[in-house]
Image (cartoon, helix red, strand yellow):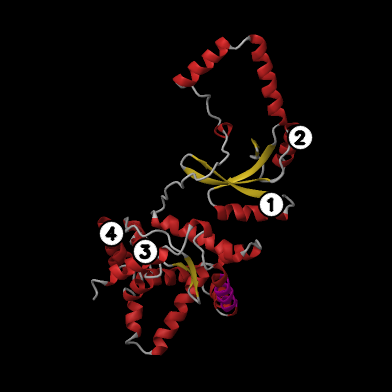
């Protein structure tokens, strides 16, 4: 039975991944997720967040770090298991050594003495393992009390629990031991997220969308071990050649075509053509780019900051150098006659000195 369990999880995830499509951004049950997210947020504001704020205010940083180290270490067997399930044998043995060193020399994991020894910390789970096995991205789901997740990552609840010594110890130890330990564990986890949740709340963004996008980007980062591949360019990205300050094309074909065209075009016609091109260039609508960001979440944060300063902008994805960037740009096209004055105005504002002009 134990041998068949991974295959059951694999088939389950493959089946459930079909529930989500690009059209719904892998969030087919968004109305339900929003209700659950609202419930979780209410519970959090009443219980965990005040407890985490008090914990952060009272407990010194070194002691909080030791507590975090302890819980990271005690749950590290799940990372080691998934190292080997993903075929990362060398990393698996390294992480096993890290666990042994911190559990002994690090006093039950309170101190991370393995890192200075070159045994770096990794973060692997069964959701990442399923992704390695070829299971596609699945639907986003928000679980009551547990928060953001996906159907592909859901089976990790089983492996994380099965490899958690505190879970098995809870079957033996008395409740007056297990309950306080569990409370400290969740308060510590919530304290680590205080800065992120405070930023989300202060920026007055849509909390649900902000959390969902941040969660997806974090998952993508971990699945590809910090080196996610470039997204496919599925639409016209309007990325202009001048954005790269690149040299004009010097390919053989382009040169010969240009030379041939110059030979057969009369001088008068050439001058007229240049004049027409200049007029088209002048009448063409332009747009001012304000900033560029690696992720959509960063762009959303900056967009809200611009809004507070009275600057209305829109987010525009652009693709270059095998990466996807998210531009924040003014939402009103302007003529070339007005563009330089407007651009100069933006560049004089704090934080916008690198704004640039682009074709609409």
- Examine the rendered structure and indicate whether residue 348 appears above or below residue 130: above
- Of labels 4 and 2, earlier in sequence is 4
- Of labels 1 and 2, earlier in sequence is 1
Q: Which residue is mark 4?
A: 94
Q: Main secondary structure of the magenta part?
A: helix
Viewer-nearest of discs 1 and 3? 3
Viewer-nearest of discs 4 and 1? 1
**Is 77 included in the stretch rendered in magenta?**
no
Q: Can residue 104 be seen by looking at this rendering?
A: no
Residues marked 4 and 1 touching at CB (< 8 Å): no
Q: Which residue is mark 3?
A: 14
- Of labels 4 and 3, earlier in sequence is 3
Front one among 205 and 256: 256
Secondary element type, mark 2:
helix
Q: What is the C-alpha distance between the residues marked 2 and 3?
A: 54 Å
Residue 63 left/right relative to 267: left
Q: Image quadrant of residue 54?
A: bottom right
Residue 338: which numbered mark, if any? 2
Give me the residue at 55% from left, 15% from top: 261
Placement of the N terminus among the 4 image quadrants: bottom left
Residue 160 drawn at (x, y percent):
36, 72
Give me the residue at 32% from left, 81% from top: 168
Secondary element type, mark 4:
helix
Residue 346 drawn at (x, y percent):
71, 42
Front one among 5 and 296: 5
- Of labels 1 and 3, earlier in sequence is 3
Q: What is the C-alpha distance between the residues marked 4 and 2?
A: 60 Å
């Amino acid at each position: 039975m134990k041998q068949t369990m991974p295959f059951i999880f694999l088939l389950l995830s493959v089946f459930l991944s079909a529930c989500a499509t690009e059209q719904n951004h892998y969030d087919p049950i968004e109305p339900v997720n929003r209700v659950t997210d609202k419930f979780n947020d209410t519970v959090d504001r009443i219980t965990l967040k005040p407890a985490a704020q008090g914990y952060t205010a009272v407990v010194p940083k070194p002691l909080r770090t030791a507590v975090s180290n302890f819980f990271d270490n005690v749950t590290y067997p799940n990372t080691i298991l998934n190292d080997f399930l993903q075929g990362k044998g060398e990393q698996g043995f390294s992480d096993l050594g890290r666990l042994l060193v911190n559990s002994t020399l690090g006093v039950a994991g309170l101190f991370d003495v393995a890192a200075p020894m070159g045994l770096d910390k990794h973060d692997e789970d069964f959701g990442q393992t399923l992704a390695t096995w070829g299971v596609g991205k699945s639907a986003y789901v928000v679980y009551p009390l547990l928060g953001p997740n996906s159907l592909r990552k859901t089976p990790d609840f089983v492996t994380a629990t099965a490899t958690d010594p505190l879970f098995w110890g809870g079957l033996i130890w008395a409740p007056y031991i297990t309950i306080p330990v569990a409370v400290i564990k969740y308060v510590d986890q919530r304290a680590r997220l205080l800065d992120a949740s405070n930023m989300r709340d202060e920026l007055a963004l849509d909390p649900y969308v902000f959390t969902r996008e941040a969660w997806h980007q974090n998952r993508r980062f971990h699945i590809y071990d910090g080196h996610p591949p470039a997204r496919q360019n599925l639409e016209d990205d309007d990325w202009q050649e001048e954005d790269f300050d690149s040299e004009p094309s010097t390919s053989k074909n382009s040169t010969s075509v240009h030379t041939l065209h110059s030979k057969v075009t009369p001088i008068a016609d050439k001058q007229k053509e240049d004049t027409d091109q200049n007029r088209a260039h002048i009448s063409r609508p332009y747009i001012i780019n304000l900033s560029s960001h690696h992720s959509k979440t960063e762009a959303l944060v900056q967009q809200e900051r611009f809004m507070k300063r009275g600057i209305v902008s829109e987010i525009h994805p652009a693709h270059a150098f095998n990466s996807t960037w998210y531009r924040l740009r003014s939402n009103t096209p302007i003529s070339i006659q007005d563009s330089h004055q407007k651009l100069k105005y933006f560049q004089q504002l704090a934080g916008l000195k690198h704004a640039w002009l682009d074709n609409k």
